[in-house]
């Protein structure tokens, strides 16, 4: 159920809904951060652009460099809630998407990357298609000169709640240990044509799929490494 559906069902204003949900989310995340455990595998040593599926965006809460990580979040009503919760955990936000405020958000993110900070993009958002990488991240990597690092997030077969949304959004259960696996950096040259853009887009997509298969197959073994 989307936030708009909740508002229509209970006949409450957007402002009231926002205040209620912000309060609930803040309380939930403040509690959850004390019962959320994770293991990072192959964490990057230098600034990069984390590429993660929209459904697995909770994985960014396991990033070691939260204070200098900027995640791009849409300007939708759902995005307002996600941005608020994200900022409460010390992660920076850049607001915009392919359909709303995308150009300004992209330029802002590129500037922050050039200043030595990290970026994070849910590369099949904000509305899908699910598990299909969009080209925007390739352009950002090309212009900024900062590599893309695909990352997958997994909490075991029954370790998360899965919502009935377009992306099948996942939220970790308390006290479950979550696994983040980071791929090797993918550098995108500045001067590339459309065919090469598609090659890098497909590389990111294939890497994410392979990392997720590894996480599912080797979860129990990898989660014991730290």
Image (tube, rainbow, N blue to C red):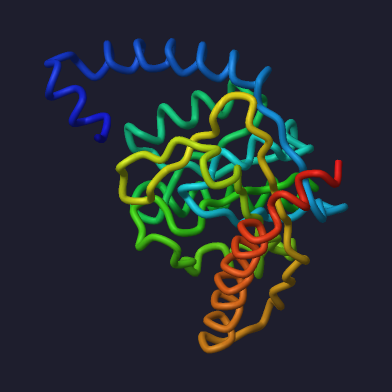
Query: In the rendering, at what x and y percent does residue 226 appear?
Result: 86, 41
Residue 24 against residue 160 in the figure, above or below: above
Residue 133 against residue 191 in the figure, above or below: above
Query: In the rendering, at what x and y percent does residue 63 appear?
Result: 72, 40
**Residue 212 position by quadrant:** bottom right
Q: Is residue 139 left or right of residue 148?
A: left
At x 71%, y 30%, the residue is 37
Q: Is residue 213 left or right of residue 20?
A: right
Q: Is residue 98 left or right of residue 206?
A: left
At x 61%, y 77%, the residue is 203
Q: Nearer the viewer, residue 16 or 180?
A: 180
Residue 160 against residue 179 in the figure, above or below: above
Q: Nearer the viewer, residue 87 or 101?
A: 87
**Residue 205 position by quadrant:** bottom right
Question: Could one spot residue 115 in this view of the protein?
Answer: no
Query: In the rendering, at what x and y percent does residue 131 appear?
Result: 45, 63
Residue 16 against residue 100 in the figure, above or below: above
**Residue 34 position by quadrant:** top right
């Amino acid at each position: 159920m989307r936030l708009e559906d909740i508002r229509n069902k209970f006949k409450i204003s957007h402002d009231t809904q926002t205040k209620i949900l912000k309060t609930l989310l803040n309380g939930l995340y403040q509690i959850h951060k004390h019962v959320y455990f994770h293991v990072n595998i192959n964490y990057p040593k230098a600034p990069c652009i984390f590429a993660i599926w929209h459904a697995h965006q909770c994985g960014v809460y396991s990033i070691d460099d939260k204070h200098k990580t900027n995640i791009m979040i849409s300007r939708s009503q759902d995005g307002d809630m996600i941005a608020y919760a994200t900022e409460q955990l010390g992660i920076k936000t850049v607001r915009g998407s392919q359909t709303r405020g995308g150009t300004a958000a992209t330029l802002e993110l590129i500037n922050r990357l050039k200043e030595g900070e990290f970026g994070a993009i849910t590369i099949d958002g904000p509305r899908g298609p699910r598990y299909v990488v969009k080209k925007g991240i390739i352009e950002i990597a090309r212009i900024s000169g900062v590599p893309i690092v695909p990352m997958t997030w997994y909490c075991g077969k029954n370790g998360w709640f899965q919502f009935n949304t377009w992306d099948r959004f996942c939220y970790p259960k308390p006290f479950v240990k979550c696994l983040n696996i980071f791929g090797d950096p993918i550098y995108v040259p500045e001067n590339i044509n459309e065919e090469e853009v598609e090659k890098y887009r497909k590389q990111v997509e294939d890497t994410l799929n392979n990392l997720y298969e590894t996480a599912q197959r080797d979860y129990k073994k990898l989660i014991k490494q730290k």
